[in-house]
Image (cartoon, grey):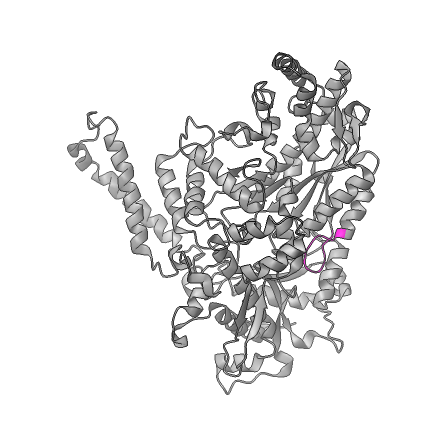
Amino acid sequence: MREINKRDPLSAWFLGPKAEHAEIWLELIEYVFRDYTNWRRNYFPNDPVVVDRAMRREQGPWFDKLDNNIDSVLNQLKSHFPFFSPRYIAHMLSEQSLPAVIGYFAGMLYNPNNVTSEAAPVTVDLEIEVGKWVSKMLGYNPNTSWAHITSGGTLANTEALWVARTVQFNSLIVKDYCDQKNLELQIDTPNGRLVDLRKLEDKQILQLHPKVSLGLVERLLKSVGKTPEKREEVTEDYQKFLEKSRFNVNSRGLYRILKEVNLEPVILVSEAAHYSIKKSANLIGYGTDSVRTIPVDSRFRMNLSALEREMNDLKDDQYISTVIGIVGTTEEGAVDPIGEIGKLREKYSNEKNSSFWFHIDSAWGGYIRSLFNGKEYDEISEKKGSTINELLKEYMPVMDMREKVRIPLKSVNFDLDINWENKEVLESFVSMKQADSITIDPHKLGYIPYPAGMVAYKNKNVTGFIVQKANYIFDPQADDRSQTEITSVGPYILEGSKPGAAALSCWLAHKTIPLELREHGKIIKTSLLNTRKLNLYLQHHKKHFQEIHEEIFGKQAKIHNEDRFEFLPVYKSPDTNVICFIVLKESWKDREGKIHDIHSINQLNKKVYEMCTINSNRKVKTPYAQEFFVSRTVIDANQYSDDSVESIYHNLNISMDSYRESNEGLFVLRSTVMNPWYYQATHHHSDPEFNFDYLFEFVKFLHETTNRVMGEFVT
């Protein structure tokens, strides 16, 4: 972590826990506002002044009313959760970067609508540029991919599934055209064979590889239109056929087409998926029953064996529309084995001659990919013949995701190693480029103000299938669609009006703090390593219980063995920067260390949680008296199957019998470690006495809180 202050200083990028950079923020906000007012005044300066001085003097009472209302709402906002503080270790919220806020403020003043360049002559171009930067960070070729900003991850997931559906059904239109016109069209099937499109069944058509489906119209026009005149003739003919086609899902609707082909689409995703996946399936007409959730392992990653079984057990009238991998589950921050899912698609293609759309929901974890972006990564990854293992072996020392940590107790005089070097997780980030589409949220680990989600597509030809006017792919003058520059956003997205301020916010943030290892990657690095630091503190709490207890309550403080408790992480090491853990009374374990009383565990953890937040059950309803914040989640049968729960509970040594008998799941405490100030707070001063370890103080707070709750707790 020594390089944290090299080049651009991370500590300059945010306002600071005590608003340390308030002066420069005020200066920049005033600078932007003055520039904006000058822009107004300089537009036809000879126009008359509409609101003269006399009129302005008469408006005093109205401004008094406004001031009173502002005071009122500002007073209410004092009850807001202090997301900016290192003491807030709860939900996926934290600081916003300075350039992101300034960009949003500037964009808000001009108020562009990015649905069209006519309403946003500047910020549409900025959104397209941001899309290229983010696509590059995710591993895509920025020249042949396409990405745009959405209101959030939910809409991004919905759009990706909508695009996948449209692309797959479009292939049926091409086949129908070839049938009726008696045209031979040679295409590549998933198993690598070259066949005439007309010989394929509808199910085979729907299960072509997305790359093939996206190029079908182009291949048709090139094979038939040997001259520019002929190409233009075929283009016009196909356009008319498309509009009237019985397989045009945009016109005919999904029900008619599924009835026509007599097939049922299936979406496969892990049980840890965000609720937006089922919502998206509902919105695109597939219905929530189409979503098959796959069990997870003890680390909340998709179980690959279970995925393969589900793929092989489909009925004859079912086909896989989409498989979704998750990079950073909402509750646990888990990372699915993305590279292995990609290999499974290859295996499925070879053995079943069937493929599917591969989508990644990385709304949470997508920006961690900035660690794998930049000159150093590009030079290593572009070496010919290099495998992922060879790439990681050479690149891991460059990332330097290691740190020595010493537990801040007098009895501890040795360092412990923490690292973010799990090869399965690293391979997943390297493999993200295999996906056909990716969801990512700038308003999470991009440290951008709401609303700012994004969806990126590997092949920008998707725009031709979802445009609401004559498709650009039918432009007879364009010979290479992949090289066509997309200069607008509105025609190709689900949303209508959308704030250009969000685009300007993302642009200024990513322009000033590039999405690379040595830039934005520094924020990600401190987040990941501090997560492991907190995880280590929680794991070692039991070993140093008495010393921590005495440090809080004094040397005379004693505690009986039967009243001791521990903080038990749900998984040994987090994949990203979310920690789930439970508070557990040690006397609840039997001789074999097995835990049987899940109800008491839940009651204890609920009481601890209530002391770690602001809620209606407590007298304290403002943040000023709340030392630290955590969030919570529940591992239960509503989301997880017995197979998943058994794997998770085995890891925690909890009896499955108690889970089945209680029927209430497991109440879990949850901390998101994304605040950028933890490292700075512990290393900024040469004298250790002036440094402050928020994460260890948090563990002490949990200890004190649990001890107090235990005194009131009756099993």
Q: Quadrant of residue 209?
A: top right
- Relative vertical location of residue 217 with respect to residue 62 in this rendering, above or below: above
Residue 73 at what x, y percent from top left?
36, 48
Q: Name the side, left or right, on which 95 lies relative to 60.
A: right
- Relative vertical location of residue 41 with respect to residue 393 in this rendering, above or below: above
Residue at 73%, 75% (x, y): give it. 593
Residue 243 at what x, y percent from top left?
65, 17
Which residue occupies the foreground of this view, 640 or 313? 313
Q: How many marks?
A: 0
Asked whether residue 151 appears in the rendered view, the answer is no
Residue at 60%, 42% (x, y): give it. 438
Q: Residue furthest bottom?
A: 556
- Relative vertical location of residue 305 with respect to residue 659 in this rendering, above or below: above
Q: Name the side, left or right, on which 124 lies relative to 288.
A: left
Magenta part of the chain? 295-304
Q: Is residue 93 magenta?
A: no
Residue at 46%, 66% (x, y): give it. 2
Quarter the C terminus occupies: bottom right
Q: Name the side, left or right, on which 669 lies relative to 515.
A: right
Which residue occupies the foreground of this view, 199 or 637? 199
User: Which is the main secondary structure of the residues drawn in magenta?
Assistant: loop
